[in-house]
Image: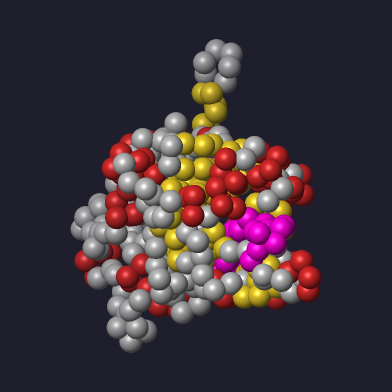
């Protein structure tokens, strides 16, 4: 029996950590019982004498005979009488490993709402009836959904709960452009909103003479959606897939044009962070953007820039990332997918050994950061200046565990 007093735990642990610790603890208990079963050990307690007796039966390979070992302590009974007594009065012996698996109960792991209660309002989940000796199965308190799932697995697998199965998410249909929620207040974890353009510096009208940069005033395109996906392979051309937000606009035949930046993060599980930017006016009104869309890959790689910024995070992370624009196509491989009303940039983070190593370390740390990004096309001639931002974004505490799993 394992008891956890949440009254003292919840003051020091986050809800997700407390639930994780409890699940791991239940897993260790299940593993211990399986270990006892595997060793064919039968530990029994003689309630009348208070003595612990170990009874091990080993099947011999030759002759199919059975050898029996006992370690009784001072009860004066022969091995035959002892075995006979154990067979006749099983109710007097409590076996650690012969308990009915179906009768196992996994008591409540509180739902997140349980952690939000105040210290004074906390009350134990188990009443006196829970420990009644008149019933073989303890009475469950109000069961959480997680506990019910654990119990169902225990019945099906005879007491062994594979907790990794609990972590595996169900496949769900993906509507591209809707998997990451928007939160303009930037208070909801694992959400996005547009960043303030004025916090990014771009080349001014006289940059070729004075090399001065100015604060951006606006963006050419508006960010309308974002995806946070995971898969067992690299996912390309999200904008061209049926059901995507891009294809919905294409079906309406409107003037909208999309630039989609698909950040492809490598690993045993691959993650995709896709950003959807849309403009309602004709592309011809922005000559630099039109040249970028219609240009070849070499031209695009020489012009597409990103400005990263960590607005909330540790000082070391902020200093290492900085806030300097860089040509993304010169550092990483970018695959371009051009459709009727979109251009998608598949940024393969795994194409650089350094970037791949950094991504592996940063991925688990994203939930501690608020990250801001800005994208633009580099202006190199007086006719192209001043620069303008294509779009910005702000991600609030991205969580890798909340990425939507794509169906193969």
Q: Relative to residue 194, is residue 124 drawn left or right?
A: left
* Residue 376 x %, y %: 61, 58
Q: Is residue 44 visible?
A: no
Q: Residue at x 74, y 74 (%)?
A: 212
Q: Residue at x 24, y 63 (%)?
A: 142
Q: Relative to residue 53, is residue 128 drawn left or right?
A: left
Q: Residue at x 59, y 46 (%)?
A: 291
* Residue 129 x %, y %: 21, 66
State the residue in front, 228 or 212: 212
Which residue ends up furthest to the front in the rendered image?
Answer: 383
* Residue 374 x %, y %: 58, 63
Q: Residue at x 68, y 43 (%)?
A: 299
Q: Relative to residue 16, is residue 154 drawn left or right?
A: left
**Residue 380 shown in magenta:** yes
State the residue in front, 280 or 381: 381
Which residue ends up furthest to the top in the rendered image?
Answer: 63
**Residue 126 shown in magenta:** no
**What range is drawn magenta here?**
365-386
In the rendered view, tell whether residue 303 sits above or below residue 341.
below
The image quadrant of residue 312 is: bottom right
Quarter of the figure with the C terminus: top left
């Amino acid at each position: 029996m394992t008891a956890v007093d949440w009254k003292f735990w919840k003051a020091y642990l986050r809800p997700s950590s407390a639930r994780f610790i409890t699940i791991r603890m239940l897993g260790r208990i299940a593993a211990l019982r399986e270990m006892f079963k595997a060793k064919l050990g039968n530990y029994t307690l003689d309630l009348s004498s208070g003595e612990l007796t170990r009874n091990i039966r080993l099947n011999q390979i030759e002759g199919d005979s059975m050898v029996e070992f006992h370690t009784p302590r001072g009860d004066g009974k022969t091995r035959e009488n002892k075995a006979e007594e154990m067979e006749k009065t099983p109710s007097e012996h409590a076996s650690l490993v012969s308990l009915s698996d179906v009768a196992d109960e996994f008591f409540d792991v509180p739902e997140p709402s349980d952690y939000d209660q105040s210290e004074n309002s906390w009350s134990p989940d188990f009443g006196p009836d829970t420990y009644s000796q008149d019933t073989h199965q303890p009475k469950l308190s109000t069961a959480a959904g997680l506990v019910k799932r654990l119990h169902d697995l225990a019945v099906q697998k005879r007491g062994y709960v594979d907790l990794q199965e609990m972590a595996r998410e169900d496949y769900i249909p993906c509507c591209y452009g809707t998997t990451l929620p928007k939160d303009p207040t930037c208070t909801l974890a694992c959400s996005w909103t547009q960043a303030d353009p004025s916090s990014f510096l771009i080349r001014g009208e006289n940059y070729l003479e004075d090399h001065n940069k100015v604060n951006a005033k606006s963006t050419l395109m508006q960010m309308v959606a974002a995806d946070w996906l995971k898969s067992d392979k690299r996912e390309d051309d999200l904008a061209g897939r049926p059901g995507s937000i891009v294809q919905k606009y294409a079906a309406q035949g409107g003037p909208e044009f999309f630039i989609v930046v698909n950040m492809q993060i490598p690993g045993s599980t691959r993650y995709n962070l896709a950003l959807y930017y849309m403009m309602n006016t004709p592309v011809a009104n922005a000559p630099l953007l039109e040249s970028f869309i219609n240009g070849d890959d070499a031209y695009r790689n020489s012009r597409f820039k990103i400005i990263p910024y960590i607005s909330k995070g540790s000082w070391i992370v902020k200093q290492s990332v900085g806030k300097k624009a860089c040509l993304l196509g010169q550092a990483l491989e970018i695959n371009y997918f051009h459709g009727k009303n979109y251009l998608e940039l598949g940024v393969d983070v795994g194409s650089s050994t350094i970037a791949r190593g950094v991504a592996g370390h940063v991925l688990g740390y994203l939930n501690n950061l608020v990250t801001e990004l800005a994208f633009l096309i580099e202006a190199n001639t007086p006719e192209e200046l001043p620069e303008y931002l294509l779009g910005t974004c702000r991600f609030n505490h991205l969580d890798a565990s909340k990425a939507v799993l794509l169906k193969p």
